Amino acid sequence: MAAELALLEGTLGLRNGTKYGAQGERQIPVLQTNNGPGLTGLITIAAHLVKQAKKEQLLGSTAEEKAVVQQWLEYRVTRVDRCSSKEDTRTILKDLNTHLEDKVYLAGNSFTLADILMYYGLHHVMVDLTVQEKEKYLNVSRWFNHIQHYPGVRQQLSNVVFIKNRLYTNAH
């Protein structure tokens, strides 16, 4: 997760080069701030970085959008990060596929921190999917492909290849 936070810094245009610690057997990220107690947890540190970069719009612009962003950030930490089997992975992809059926981004029509962190959390899963699996989760594939091409997000992560004509032909 420290690597993801470093990627997020790059996406946000922060050049902190911050070193993140990790605590516990789950390796929960920790950021020691200059003034005060350390910050613990992916979502807490990520939200801090967004505010530090003065890009609060990534946390949502309306009360409802902020709640939806928070919901997907929690989903990322409670479901995606704890995914331990093929069955868990299929459930997550199915949930996301249904949610993204009529949406461009996780929180609706705006690119948010939820999209960035979900992209980072799913990258290793999407890399390993077969062409058939990518087609089965067409909405996730469309969303993932869109996010990986969003300026500054992918950075040094490998590009996941999709068959483009399949991603957009079944659009509603």
Image: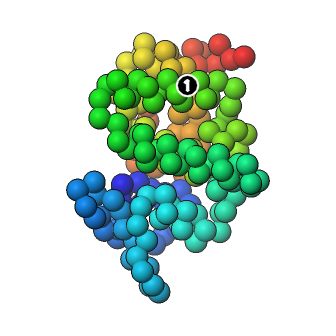
Q: Which residue lies furthest to the left in this view?
A: 25
Q: Which residue is drawn at 45% across and 30% down?
A: 92
Q: Name the residue under label 1.
A: 97
The C terminus - image quarter: top right
Q: Which residue is drawn at 31% across and 68% down?
A: 21
Q: Residue at x 37, y 18 (%)?
A: 130
Question: In the displayed structure, does residue 158 sit left or right of residue 49?
Answer: left
- Number of residue marks: 1
Residue 162 vs residue 135, the one in the foreground: 135
Question: In the displayed structure, does residue 65 sit left or right of residue 25?
Answer: right
**Color style of the picture:** rainbow
Image position, residue 144 (x, y; %): 53, 33
Q: Which residue is drawn at 41% across and 40% down?
A: 80
Establish if 73 lies above or below 145: below
Q: In which quarter of the image is residue 168?
A: top right
Is residue 56 in view? Answer: yes
Establish if 83 lies above or below 46: above
Image position, residue 61 (x, y; %): 74, 55
